Image (cartoon, rainbow, N blue to C red):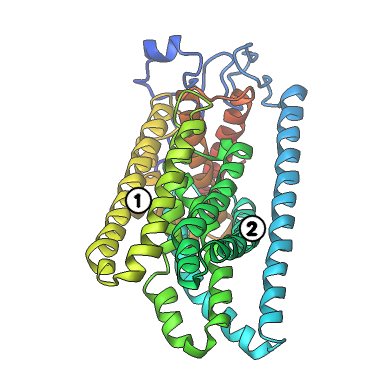
């Protein structure tokens, strides 16, 4: 477990390190630990921080940078509170509707809720697996879940019911009204409200988006919330055929809503890698269109001809799994590239980069740290988290989306990496 300590100085670059012309001329280039004014928390004695980085010679953060970060955190806190409150109120309204439908039958409601939790757990485990390289903030994921379970569900209930009633009055046929609701109004309004939640999260927490995988993660969480609330409604409504309903929704298609909305999330997440900050304006509608088409196909064609489930939907789902696997691999390779740039500047040992960008390496490092005690285990966890955040920060800069406090944030993450390394190696003074 080499830590990249050279000549007793944890901040010295490797002996063979030489700054490339790209790093020299790129204002976002990785600073060498011994550079004057580098973003590292500890420069050489007698070398004050230069104007290139927003960090003082002693590693302190300037007031303007602190204020900027504090304002951003406050905005995020307010947004989380608003989204969670709206979603929570919506979920309460959904449960109130369930209570009225069952005439206050608590056992029936509990059975429906327990059954709805089963596919939800499966989806959330899958989301956790997808998101383990660069985990998204739990608080934002909770807000996303509540948006899907509350806001998207309530709006969809109101609009779908209204659309079905209008269609019935226009056609006089209950079958035609039900078909219109299932194939037209439901896909449009449900995917729009779910996609809107993903878009709001993207616009507020754009710094947390590092590509398509993040978009899929948030879309999956929103869709999981929606499916959870909708499943409760269906399990109560079709209590007479509960076993069949649970099989169709909880076993045969637990990822249906996730797959639909993931199309929108994929497009929105991909826009984060575009140079234009307005790329979402044309990518989001493309993703939403795909989500609506997938949803309408499921509600119309698959419901009418179940054989399409096996010849179309199952292969399509497997193709989606393959796409996610490829995206995760691509994210891991991007992380390796960005951390390798820091390694060339002396901040990481190459062995650390390999450890940080492989599943087996990360797991082995955590086991090794755990054997050294709780402090070492926690330090290794923070080391891996900070390294992932550092790679994400640099990728944003490479994509042209560096914020004004890029240098300050980089310095803080590098300090965290160094402190955690010293802790789990036992070299902290």
Whether 266 is drawn above or below 17: the answer is: below
Residue at 68%, 58% in the rendered image? 87
Quarter of the image with the C terminus is: top right
Give residue 266's mark: none
- Within 10 Å of the Cα at label 2, are there few (<14), some (14-19), or many (20+) other Cα atoms? some
Q: Which of 242 and 317 is in front in this view?
A: 242
Q: Which residue occupies 77% across, 28% down? A: 67
Q: How crowded is mark 1: few (under 14 residues within 10 Å), some or many (20 or more)?
A: some
Q: What element carries label 2?
A: helix
Where residue 241 appears, as percent x and y from the top left, is 47, 88
Q: For this rendering, which residue is in front, 138 or 224?
A: 224
Work out whether residue 237 can be spotted: yes
Label 1 sits on residue: 324
Residue 380's spot in the image, x, y percent? 51, 50
Q: Where is residue 71 in the image (x, y as percent from the top left)?
A: 75, 33
In the figure, is residue 53 to the left or right of 99? left
Residue at the image point whose x is 31% and y is 60% from the top: 317
């Amino acid at each position: 477990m080499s830590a990249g300590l050279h000549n007793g100085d944890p901040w010295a670059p490797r002996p063979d390190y030489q700054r490339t012309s790209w790093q020299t001329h790129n204002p976002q280039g990785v600073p060498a630990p011994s550079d004057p004014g580098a973003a590292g928390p500890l420069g050489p004695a007698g070398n004050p921080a230069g104007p290139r980085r927003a960090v003082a010679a002693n590693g302190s953060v300037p007031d303007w940078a602190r204020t900027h970060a504090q304002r951003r955190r406050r905005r995020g806190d307010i947004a989380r509170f608003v989204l969670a409150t709206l979603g929570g109120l919506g979920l309460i309204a959904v449960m109130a509707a369930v209570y009225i439908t069952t005439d206050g039958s608590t056992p029936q409601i509990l059975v429906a809720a327990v059954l709805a939790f089963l596919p939800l757990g499966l989806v959330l485990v899958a989301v956790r697996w997808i998101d383990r390289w660069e985990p998204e903030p739990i608080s934002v994921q909770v807000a996303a879940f509540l948006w899907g379970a509350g806001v998207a569900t309530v709006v969809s209930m109101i609009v779908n019911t209204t659309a079905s009633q209008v269609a019935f009055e226009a056609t006089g046929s209950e079958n035609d009204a039900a078909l219109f609701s299932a194939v037209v109004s439901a896909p449009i309004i449900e995917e729009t409200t779910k996609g809107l939640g993903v878009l709001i999260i993207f616009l507020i927490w754009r710094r947390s988006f590092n590509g398509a995988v993040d978009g899929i993660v948030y879309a999956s969480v929103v869709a999981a919330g929606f499916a959870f609330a909708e499943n409760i409604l269906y399990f109560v409504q079709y209590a007479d055929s509960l076993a069949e309903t649970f099989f169709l929704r909880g076993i045969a298609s637990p990822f249906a809503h996730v797959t639909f909305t993931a199309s929108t999330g994929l497009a929105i997440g991909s826009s984060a890698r575009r140079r234009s900050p307005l790329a979402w304006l044309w990518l989001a509608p493309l993703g939403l269109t795909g989500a609506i088409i997938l949803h309408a196909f499921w509600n119309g064609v698959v419901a009418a001809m179940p054989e399409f489930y096996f010849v179309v939907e199952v292969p399509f789902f497997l193709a989606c799994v393959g796409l996610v696997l490829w995206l995760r691999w691509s994210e891991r390779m991007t992380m390796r590239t960005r951390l390798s740039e820091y390694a060339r500047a002396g901040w990481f040992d190459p062995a650390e980069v390999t450890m940080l960008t492989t599943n087996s390496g990360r797991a082995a490092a955590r086991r090794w740290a755990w054997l050294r005690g709780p402090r070492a285990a926690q330090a290794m966890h923070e080391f891996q988290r900070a390294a992932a955040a550092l790679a994400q920060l640099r990728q944003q800069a490479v994509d042209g989306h560096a914020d004004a406090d890029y240098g300050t944030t980089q310095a803080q993450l590098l300090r965290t990496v160094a402190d955690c390394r010293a802790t789990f190696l036992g070299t902290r003074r």
